[in-house]
Amino acid sequence: MTTLPKVVLLTGLPTSFLARKLLPELLANVQTHIKLVVTDQQHDPTRDLIATFGAAAEDRVELVRGDITAMDFGMAG
């Protein structure tokens, strides 16, 4: 079995097919913390999706507001 990194940055939730398939795999490794870059419009739907995995998943997933199509992911001041 491959050792996963301790922190993973994932984009595309909740709409990306690939991201929706990767998330359960990443959550299967209890030592992995997942940072999800989501737009303002996708924040609530993504939070709702994470809640379907249970409280343990919610503790390990951090939603970061941003936009991967913008310069600096839209996070620069």
Image: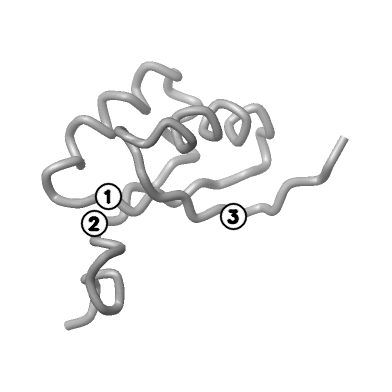
As helix, strand or loop, the secondary structure at mark 1 comes to strand
User: Which quadrant would residue 17 be assigned to in this image?
Assistant: top left
Name the residue beneath numbered marker 1. Answer: 38
Quadrant where the N terminus is found in the figure: top right
In the rendered view, tell whether residue 73 sits above or below residue 6.
Answer: below
User: Which quadrant would residue 3 be assigned to in this image?
Assistant: top right
Indicate the position of residue 5 as horizontal and vertical percent values: 70, 53
Left or right of residue 32: residue 23: left
Badge 1 local density, few (<14 within 10 Å), some, or many (20+)? Answer: many
Q: Residue furthest left?
A: 41
In the rendered view, tell whether residue 67 sits above or below residue 42.
Answer: below
Indicate the position of residue 59 as horizontal and vertical percent values: 45, 36
At label 3, the amino acid type is: Val
- Cα separation, mark 1 vs mark 2, equals 5 Å
As helix, strand or loop, the secondary structure at mark 3 comes to strand
Residue drawn 49% across and 35% down? 18
Q: Earlier in the sequence, mark 3 or mark 2?
A: 3
At label 1, the amino acid type is: Val
- Cα separation, mark 1 vs mark 3, equals 17 Å
Please say if the residues under marks 1 and 2 sit with CB atoms less than 8 Å apart. Answer: yes
Name the residue beneath numbered marker 2. Answer: 65
Badge 2 local density, few (<14 within 10 Å), some, or many (20+)? Answer: some
Residue drawn 30% across and 78% down? 72
Q: Residue furthest right?
A: 1
Left or right of residue 56: residue 4: right
Indicate the position of residue 57 as horizontal and vertical percent values: 48, 29
Q: Which mark is on residue 7? A: 3
Q: Earlier in the sequence, mark 1 or mark 2?
A: 1
At label 2, the amino acid type is: Arg
Left or right of residue 76: residue 58: right
Residue drawn 20% across and 51% down? 39
Q: Residue furthest bottom?
A: 77
